């Protein structure tokens, strides 16, 4: 008989017997459901190892090319690359500018917010899979602030995102062409403007 080790748990040492039995039943049910969900996942999804500590798989789907796409509470993980050399990518929800579903063409467009993500990726599905709504909700949840500051003769776009799981705030600053951040005076003015913005918003 195969055994499957589960997570360590703290046992309730005191309390009436019915309460202890109920606790055990709930814990066993939770462990069984977690194991069943692992077994039901396709082999490619089970091989996904690029998960951060405490990151949980929420849903997954296969696109029309039969490539797996996994959505966790923290990130979108598409399986990319040529046959035989596929690898998992990790796009944190706070790193995604927006996702847009096109029902007519069955496509989910993912727009990157940071330079190291693809500017635009189109995923194609046979129908509207649950991953579409989850991605929309996750990206919307991360949004905290988007504003434009005037700095001298130019402007600076500021975007603030909350990272899922850790709840850390990420500040992304995009200077316009007229803003020279290498100029010490401009840099000092920008730092002052960001300090005031943090104080005004509490972020």
Image (cartoon, rainbow, N blue to C red):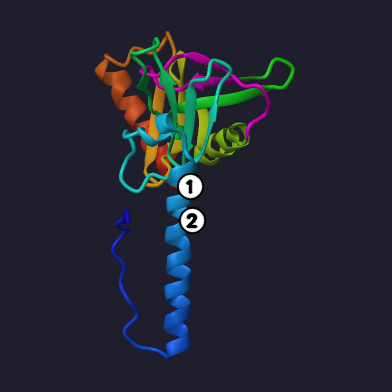
Disc 1 and disc 2 in contact, CB within 8 angstroms: yes
Mark 1 neighbour class, 10 Å CA radius: few under 14, some 14 to 19, many 20 or more = few
Q: Is residue 203 visible?
A: no
Q: Position of residue 80 (x, y in %)?
A: 41, 17
Q: Is residue 112 magenta?
A: yes
Residue behind mark 2: 33
Judging depth in this view, the residue of 57 and 90 nearest the camera is 57
Query: Residue 77: image x %, image y %?
Result: 43, 29
Look at the image and give the residue range highlighted in magenta: 108-129
Which residue is found at the position 32% from the left and 76% from the top?
11
On residue 67, the disc is: none
Q: Is residue 70 above or below residue 10?
A: above
Which mark, residue 37? 1
189, 101: nearer the viewer: 101
Measure how far apart labels 1 and 2 are at the Cα level.
Answer: 6 Å
Q: Tell me where residue 106 appears, x and y as whole percent.
A: 67, 19
Q: Residues within 10 Å of mark 2 (few under 14, many from 20)?
A: few
Q: Residue at x 62, y 23 (%)?
A: 100
Determine which quarter of the picture holds residue 118.
top left
Q: Is residue 117 left or right of residue 144?
A: left
| Callout count | 2
Q: Regarding mark 2 in the picture, which secondary structure is present there? A: helix
Q: Which one is in front, 117 or 34? A: 34
Viewer-side residue, 150 vs 158:
158
The answer to if 10 sits in the magenta stretch is: no
Can you say whether 152 is above or below 128 in the image?
above
43 is higher (above) or lower (below) than 4: above
Q: Could you tell whether 192 is left or right of 29 in the image? A: left
């Amino acid at each position: 008989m195969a055994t499957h080790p589960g997570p360590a748990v703290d046992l309730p040492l005191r309390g009436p017997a019915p309460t202890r039995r109920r606790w055990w039943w709930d814990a066993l049910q939770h462990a069984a459901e977690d194991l069943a969900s692992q077994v039901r996942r396709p082999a490619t999804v089970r091989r996904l190892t690029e998960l951060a500590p405490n990151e949980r798989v929420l849903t997954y789907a296969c696109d029309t090319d039969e490539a797996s796409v996994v959505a966790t509470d923290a990130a979108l993980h598409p399986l990319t690359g040529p046959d035989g050399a596929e690898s998992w990518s990790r796009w944190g929800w706070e790193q995604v500018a927006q996702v847009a579903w096109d029902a007519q063409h069955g496509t989910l467009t993912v727009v990157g917010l940071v330079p190291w993500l693809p500017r635009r990726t189109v995923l194609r599905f046979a129908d509207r899979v649950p991953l579409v709504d989850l991605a929309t909700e996750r990206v919307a949840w991360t949004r905290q602030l988007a504003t434009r500051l005037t700095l001298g003769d130019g402007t600076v776009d500021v975007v603030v995102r909350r990272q899922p799981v850790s709840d850390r705030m990420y500040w992304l600053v995009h200077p316009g062409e007229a803003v020279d951040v290498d100029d010490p005076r401009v840099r000092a003015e920008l730092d002052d403007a960001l300090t005031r913005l943090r104080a005004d918003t509490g972020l």
